[in-house]
Image (cartoon, grey):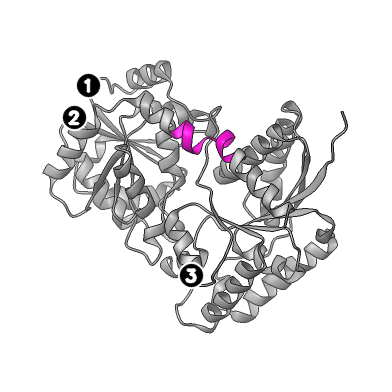
Amino acid sequence: MAYKVYKIAYFTIEDISSGLFKTQVLNKLAAISKKNKNYSIDLICINRPWKLLSHINTLFMCRNFIRQNNININIIYIPFMLPLRNALKSLIYTKFVKFYLYIWLVILRIKRYKLIHVRSYLPMFSLSNFNHKNLIFDTRSIWIDENISTGDLIEGSTVHKYLLGEERKCLISANQICVVSKPMIQHYENKVKNLAINLIPISFDQGSFSFDVLKRQSIRSKYQLENSYVFVYLGSFGQSGVNTQSLIKLFNSILKIDNSKLLLLTAENNKTVSNLLGKIEADTSKVILIEPTFSEISGYLSAADIGLHALPNQIDSDSRLGTKVIEYLACGLPVIVNENVGAASRLLLENRLGSVINLDSNLTHYQEALKELIGLNRSAIEDFAVKNFSSTKIADDYLRIYLKALKG
């Protein structure tokens, strides 16, 4: 039986070799495509030219993944993104980036698409000028506040004021808006009334993240962890190293617990890791540093007992959820965060999935959190994650939004 096919553009400047691209872009779109064959998706990726050689293999693997899964996604890869380091220091350059992306959208004939789904702010700044009636703004973070927190944007500067104006235009021009946490809804509603805002949390792919008992046993045996309390931290130390001081406090307390070990799963360079560990007073020989491949992450998370995340107090702290938190839960891990991972804090406490710690608390508080969490049922935590954050569940949410957008 014939069915009508809608052409959709998904536009992103996310680095295609990043974990975020795989988990939060490609896997998500694959789940959407599998569930509804009515959508033909052009995945438009504008990336930095100096990454081209390393991206060739990544691009091959992405396209091979699409063929193997028989999904209706076409990757349009453009290796000509402008440098963005310090881009928000200059109003002229910020406007030029917007204009540059606008030109690419004209070349791509973006208005021919029935629906446009755009990830993040910079691409949306350009798209808001096209007056497209079916435009989905997928914010994923309060980007302006995030850049103030990292020091890349000066609050009250001419660039900041310009970006606030552009943000308002984006909110008004979007048919549907997607956010990852409830505080983000309130943030945008305070700026513009009567917005169509949808809560679409961070997702994970069950094929990539799940609790694996056999891998747990194998890894714990390999690293002699059988009689240890194993904590794990996954990922970077934050944009511009903004999370470093918070992580030093967290790791220092964790490593003081008797029989504790820390799996540090990161691709940060050796100098950055050494600088962080060098500021920890506790015994850093209890740290096991690993740079896992993407396919290995789930096994290491399965081997651990508790996942960790911490952030400094930032202007957007209340909205923070964290991809790593969702990936911990997907592998059945209870989680410890500090209060500055605001959205995650509420999620963990409301559903008894973890503990919230003040980083300046004494060792007793950490020991009490460990005692509370170590006995939680990992299968129940994993089931909660699947029910609320799996890519198949999130795909259903997006399909409802697509339908609402197409109906105008």
Q: Please determine whether, in this image, residue 95 is positioned above or below residue 343.
A: below
Residue situated in front as seen by the camera: 389 or 99: 389
| Residue 97 percent across, percent down from the top left | 68, 70
CA separation in Å, label 1 and label 3: 44 Å
Q: Which residues are magenta?
A: 385-395
CA separation in Å, label 2 and label 3: 40 Å
Q: Earlier in the sequence, mark 1 or mark 2?
A: 1
Side of 214 where 26 appears, left or right: right
Q: Residues at badges 1 and 2 in contact (C-beta under 8 Å)?
A: yes
The residue at the point 25 percent across, 35 percent down is 286
In the rendered image, which residue does mark 3 sit on?
A: 152
Q: Secondary structure at mark 3?
A: loop
Residue situated in front as seen by the camera: 240 or 366: 366
Q: Please determine whether, in this image, residue 95 is positioned above or below residue 258.
A: below
In the rendered image, which residue does mark 2 sit on?
A: 259
Q: Secondary structure at mark 1?
A: loop
